[in-house]
Image (cartoon, grey):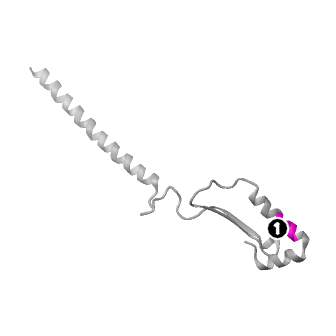
Amino acid sequence: MIKEEAFERMKNDPEYENYVLNRVRSAYSVQGLPVGSNNVSFDVIGASPEECYGYAGPVGKSGSETANDGESWWKKRHERMEELMKEQEKEAVKKSTGKTKSCTKRISK
């Protein structure tokens, strides 16, 4: 975005016009962020180099958050892994208990 003040200065100051054109050229001549639905980049051209700024980066929620509750994917994964480990532990106890009973029966015969 080029502000009106910048445009006026570019008309009257060839050096500033050259600065702005080089800035824009530089911004569009390199590979930026990967294209995605939550990435944005922009430049604001002001009446002086000090008033020029830009931004490039993600906006909104990151890919690691869900749209409905904002809970991170890693937290949900950790909770699910905890549940699976508890289930596996219970299964292992059941199996070992069953083997112990069958061994005791064999010995008592």
Residue drawn at x 20%, y 33% is 97
Query: In the visual, does 49 lie left or right of 72?
Result: right
- Quarter that holds the N terminus: bottom right
Which quarter of the picture shows residue 71?
bottom left
x, y (%) of residue 81? 38, 46
Magenta segment range? 16-21
Under tag 1, what secondary structure?
Answer: helix
Which quarter of the picture shows residue 39?
bottom right
Residue 19, compared with residue 96, is above or below; it is below
Instruction: Give whichever of 80, 67 is nearer the camera.
Output: 67
Q: What secondary structure characterizes most of the magenta part?
A: helix
Residue 2, compared with residue 34, is above or below; it is below
17 falls in the magenta region: yes
Residue drawn at x 50%, y 55% is 64
Circle 1 sits on which residue? 20
x, y (%) of residue 33? 65, 55
Residue drawn at x 79%, y 59% is 26
10 falls in the magenta region: no
Query: In the visual, does 68 lie left or right of 89?
Result: right
Which quarter of the picture shows residue 105?
top left
x, y (%) of residue 87? 29, 43
Instruction: Give whichever of 48, 35 is nearer the camera.
Output: 35
Query: Label 1: few (<14), some or many (≥20) within 10 Å?
Result: many
